[in-house]
Image: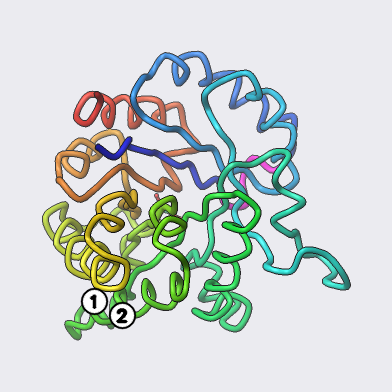
Amino acid sequence: MRVPLVAANWKMNLGKPTEALEFVRSIRHRLQEIEHVDIVLCPPFTSLFAVAEILSRSRITVGAQNSHWEPKGAFTGEISPAMLTEACRYAIVGHSERRAMRSEAESDAAVHRKVQALVANGLTPIVCVGENLQQNEAGQTQEVVGAQVSAAFEGLSPDSVAGCVIAYEPIWAIGTGKAASPVDANRIINLAIRGVLAGAFGEATAQKVRILYGGSATADNMASFAEMPEIDGALVGGASLKPEFVKLVEEVARVRGK
Ligand code: PEP
């Protein structure tokens, strides 16, 4: 059985350590009480270590929102996987906002290098994949998502792949208030993500990978996603910045816990 996981993507919010800590202090006790769900907070780099420190003795873990692939060197402004290991267990890679803003630095090839580097450093990548509205309307979702999955994991060992997390995030659903239908998300995850992984790495490996839904997930709609057999939790943007986040995680625990 895959343990469900909910990851909070704070994006460029709560970046001042004081405001990040105030928010974490307001939700951590209730979050701590939720069993059978892995919880990951992904603050901006500026508040990441402060959040990691306050959560160091809790079961809530911390992730970065990005990572470079090189270990060190002349890469001004970049953060390497090795720099993250003292604070983080996870790192988001290939988020659609980065793929859109930085087409080269967040290309499929770059995402692949990031995944390799994170795994080599003992960190768990949360690899974001998803189609845009035009691709969705043209019926290309399966092809687009399948290609992103193939590119991200190419050449990795089945064991390494099994430990990774993937977030299926239809771009048109991110931050829009228009979530995908749980049945559609479940179908795409089954065909274009787990199916592609099974073809490349074997069914047993594919069954171990945790695959999240992302895109306007809220406390109110989370249960309908968590009820889907292929959906193992959520990557949450807007709702992760509010006390509602606790309720959203509780919904996953209620539906998928144990
Ligand atoms: C995201 O950015 O990963 C995301 C899912 O955002 P939101 O929940 O706000 O749609």
Q: Is mark 2 on a helix, strand or loop?
A: helix
- Category of crowding for the residue at label 1, using alpha-carbon neighbours closer than 10 angstroms: few (below 14), some (14–19), many (at least 20): many
Please report the residue visible at 32 percent of the width from the left and 52 percent of the height from the top: 211
Please identify the quarter of the rendering in which residue 70 is found: bottom right
Rendered location of residue 142, percent (x, y):
22, 76
Q: Which residue reaches farthest right?
A: 74
Seen at 83% across and 64% down, the residue is 72
Instruction: State the residue position of label 1.
Output: 141
Residue depicted at 74% across the width and 59% down the height: 80
Name the spot of residue 99 as percent of width and height, x first.
Answer: 52, 74
The magenta-colored residue range is 11-15
Q: Nearer the viewer, residue 38 or 154?
A: 154
- Tell whether position 118 is magenta: no
**Label 2 crowding class (10 Å Cα cut-off): few <14, some 14-19, many 20+?**
some
The residue drawn where x is 37% and y is 56% is 167
Q: Mark 2 points at which residue?
A: 144
Q: How far apart are marks 2 and 1 (CA)?
A: 5 Å
Which amino acid, by three-letter code, is at mark 2? Answer: Val
| 153 and 74: which is toward the camera | 153
Three-letter residue code for mark 1: Thr
Q: In this view, does 42 lie above or below 141?
A: above
Question: Which residue is at the far left?
Answer: 183
